[in-house]
Amino acid sequence: MKEKDFRKHFIKNIPIGIGEAAQFTGVTRRQLRYWEDKKIIFAKASKSNNRQYSYQTLFKIIRIKDLMEQGFTLDASFEKITQEDLEINAESLQKTKSILDANKPAKLEQNKEKKKKKKKKPKDL
């Protein structure tokens, strides 16, 4: 595994307990549990049945907290974040499609060349 991929995988999979999450984000444990009950955030259960959050979830918690400090309700904050995520995903898909479309003619040409080479090879006796 490449170093960059390893780091990404490592950070993505480091479990963070509810106490650490509360301390890091400034959101109380009680609030975090409530947000889980409302299906706004998700935690995995460890082998000892403790809540464990991902880094992605921590960033979501921080974003929700920031929006609530700006006057949004919890539900409105969640909706706003969900909409932002959808827009980011749509933008990412569009960029990927553009890259694939740009490379399509080159790939088609490569495939044509491969087919021509296969036809030119003499058959085995």
Image: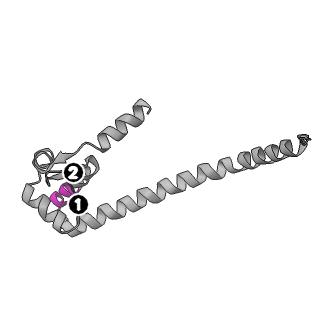
- In this rendering, is residue 54 above or below 2? below
User: Mark number for residue 30?
Assistant: none
> Residue 43 falls in which quadrant of the image?
bottom left
Examine the structure image and report whether residue 69 is included in the region drawn in magenta. Answer: yes
Residue 111 at x, y = what percent? 76, 47
Residue 125 at x, y = what percent? 92, 41
From which residue to which does the magenta span run?
64-71
User: Which of marks 1 and 2 precedes in the sequence?
Assistant: 1
Query: What is the total number of numbered labels drawn onto the structure image?
Result: 2
The residue shown at (7%, 60%) is: 30
Q: Is residue 103 left or right of residue 38?
A: right
Residue ID for mark 2: 53
Q: Nearer the viewer, mark 2 or mark 1?
A: 2
Q: As rendered, which of 76 and 37 lies closer to the eye?
A: 37
The residue shown at (18%, 63%) is: 36
Residue ID for mark 1: 41
